Image (cartoon, rainbow, N blue to C red):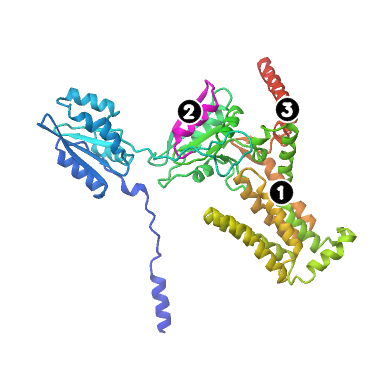
């Protein structure tokens, strides 16, 4: 009876809802600037919850007009204030002298004291003058950025070694240094419910598709969240098919890759505070192109590009092929290898699918541990962990030595792709093939590959076919995207294309 009463009490409890605070919960009511300094001071302090890094300095004009300068010391550059404001304040005897100082600080007049809060949070200083029903926002923002260095995730042998940083204006500068085109256009956008995230669209007018530019603007306008907006969130809004396992955008840290794509009609998106750029629209084969392809002999570039495409097939299908052969199609193994493989797998106590899943998940754990740990330790974990675990599971009889070879070749093949987004997709795409191979053998593998192929042919990126130049087929696109023909031939193809466009 008591047990039932306890059960009924639990049943009557209200469902707990996790609080989900957003910026909208802290809306600042509009409030005009008061002519009394202390009223404005109290409003600023209350709105910022009496934060202790809010600094206030009391000043005077000609010893008869009181002024108040407020700024957040963790965001404002006090050296800039000392050089451009305090050092010249001694010569301020009238409003005429004050205007000279304000002009030097890029001052903005604010009629509402409530509008001063966003300016303070950007690192600007607010100047109140007793008797004035408005205030001034002074540019004193502290700029801290790391030096321009080599991108860690996109190494090349030849070419530029500069990478983007977290400051958007610096990234635009790096791109303009490479693309000296008069029609290179920069558009700034503020997105989110409170327009608190700034980004920029870069494209070359006349080369980029206007409809694609407008479509990006429409999709960005749909972002209404007030939480911190990152590139991952923006990517989901920009993708045509967000549930597809294939990425429909490319992120890069390299200015030279962005420059090549700009000249090819693509659109670049920078997000302030992030060191990566997004490239749209994109095709499947773009992920298998590297800047080294254009800095080496054309036949070498073509060979390695085709090798990367072959690595996609290997990375996706190799574990499934192993499972299918061991489970269903043992007869296709050459006679000389039959006894070797038989001796390797006959003592394994479970089916090949369990063996493959165990090793693939172990490899993912080692890879994830290597990423999360500091660089020297992470590399050690990756190498030592792989060797020790691989040797231990084979000696213990949990996994065959051939399975270790298959998993190692699969991992190496997945690392060949130059773009991290496609690398992650490949690592997930092999699991459905492994399951189908364990159920239907080669028939299951072919069935899965056909589904992937149909999906790739139907997929689009900003309305552009994702599997171009194979679907729709284009021979010229084949020479440009899948292989790398000589630059002289490529220029001839582009010249012929331009002449045909002029004739039409």
In the image: residue 479, left or right of residue 240? right
Residue topped by disc 1: 451
The quarter holding residue 40 reads: top left
Q: Secondary structure at mark 2?
A: strand
Which dot, 3 or 1, sits closer to the camera? 3
Residue topped by disc 2: 186
The quarter holding residue 291 reads: top right
The answer to whether residue 176 is magenta is: yes
In the image: residue 191, left or right of residue 88? right
Taking the view exactly as shown, the residue that stands out farthest to the bottom is 1
Residue topped by disc 3: 486
Which dot, 1 or 2, sits closer to the camera? 2
Q: Secondary structure at mark 1?
A: helix
Q: Earlier in the sequence, mark 2 or mark 3?
A: 2
Query: Do the numbered discs 2 and 3 sit on residues whose CB atoms are within 8 Å?
Result: no
The answer to whether residue 198 is magenta is: no
Query: Do the numbered discs 3 and 1 sit on residues whose CB atoms are within 8 Å?
Result: no
Q: Is residue 477 above or below residue 453?
A: above
Q: Which percent across, then down, holds residue 339?
A: 86, 65
Q: Earlier in the sequence, mark 1 or mark 2?
A: 2
- Judge by depth and name the residue closer to the eye, 334 or 113: 334
Magenta residues (range)? 165-188
Mark 2 Cα-neighbour bin, 10 Å: few <14, some 14–19, many ≥20 = some
- The C terminus: image quadrant: top right
- Judge by depth and name the residue closer to the eye, 81 or 2: 81
| Residue at point 74%, 36% (across, down) | 300
Taking the view exactly as shown, the residue that stands out farthest to the left is 64
| Residue at point 75%, 33% (across, down) | 299
């Amino acid at each position: 009876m008591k047990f039932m009463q306890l059960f009924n009490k639990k049943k009557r409890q209200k469902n707990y809802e996790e609080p989900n605070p957003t910026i909208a919960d802290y809306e600042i009511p509009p409030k005009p600037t008061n002519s009394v300094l202390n009223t404005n001071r109290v409003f600023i302090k209350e709105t910022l919850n009496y934060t202790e890094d809010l600094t206030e300095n009391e000043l005077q004009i000609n010893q008869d007009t009181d002024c108040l300068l407020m700024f957040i010391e963790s965001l404002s550059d006090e050296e800039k204030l000392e050089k451009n404001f305090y050092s010249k304040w001694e010569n301020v005897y009238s409003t005429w002298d004050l205007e000279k100082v304000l002009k030097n600080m890029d001052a903005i007049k604010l009629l509402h004291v409530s509008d001063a809060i966003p300016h303070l949070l950007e690192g600007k200083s607010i100047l109140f003058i007793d008797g004035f029903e408005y205030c001034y926002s002074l540019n004193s923002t502290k700029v801290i950025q790391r030096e321009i260095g080599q991108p860690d995730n996109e190494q090349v042998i030849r070419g530029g070694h500069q990478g983007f940083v977290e400051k958007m204006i610096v990234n635009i500068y790096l791109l303009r240094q490479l693309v000296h085109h008069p029609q290179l256009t920069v558009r700034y956008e503020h997105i989110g419910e409170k327009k608190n995230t700034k980004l920029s669209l870069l494209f070359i007018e006349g080369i980029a598709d206007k409809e694609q530019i407008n479509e990006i603007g429409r999709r960005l306008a749909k972002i209404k969240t007030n939480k911190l907006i990152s590139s991952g969130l923006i990517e989901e809004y920009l993708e045509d098919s967000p549930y597809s396992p294939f990425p429909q955008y490319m992120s890069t840290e390299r200015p030279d890759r962005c420059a090549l794509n700009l000249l090819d009609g693509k659109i670049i998106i920078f997000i302030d505070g992030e060191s990566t750029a997004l490239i749209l629209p994109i095709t499947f084969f773009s992920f298998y192109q590297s800047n080294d392809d254009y800095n080496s002999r054309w036949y070498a570039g073509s060979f390695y590009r085709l090798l990367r495409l072959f690595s996609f097939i290997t990375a996706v299908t190799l574990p499934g092929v192993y499972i299918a052969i061991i489970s269903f199609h043992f007869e296709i193994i050459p006679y000389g290898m039959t006894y070797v493989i038989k001796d390797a797998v006959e003592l394994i106590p479970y089916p090949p699918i369990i063996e493959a899943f165990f090793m693939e998940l172990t490899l993912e754990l080692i890879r994830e541990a290597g990423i999360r740990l500091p660089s020297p330790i992470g590399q050690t974990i990756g190498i030592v962990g792989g060797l020790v675990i691989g040797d231990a599971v084979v000696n213990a009889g949990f996994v065959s030595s051939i399975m270790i070879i298959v998993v190692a070749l699969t991992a190496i093949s997945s690392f060949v792709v130059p773009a991290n987004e496609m690398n992650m997709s490949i690592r997930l795409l092999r699991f459905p093939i492994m399951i189908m191979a364990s159920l239907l053998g080669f028939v299951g593998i072919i069935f899965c590959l056909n589904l992937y192929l149909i999906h790739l042919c139907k997929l689009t990126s900003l309305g552009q076919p994702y599997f171009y130049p194979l679907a729709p087929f284009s021979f010229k696109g084949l020479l440009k995207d899948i292989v790398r023909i000589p630059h002289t031939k490529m220029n001839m193809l582009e010249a012929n294309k331009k002449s045909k466009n002029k004739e039409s």
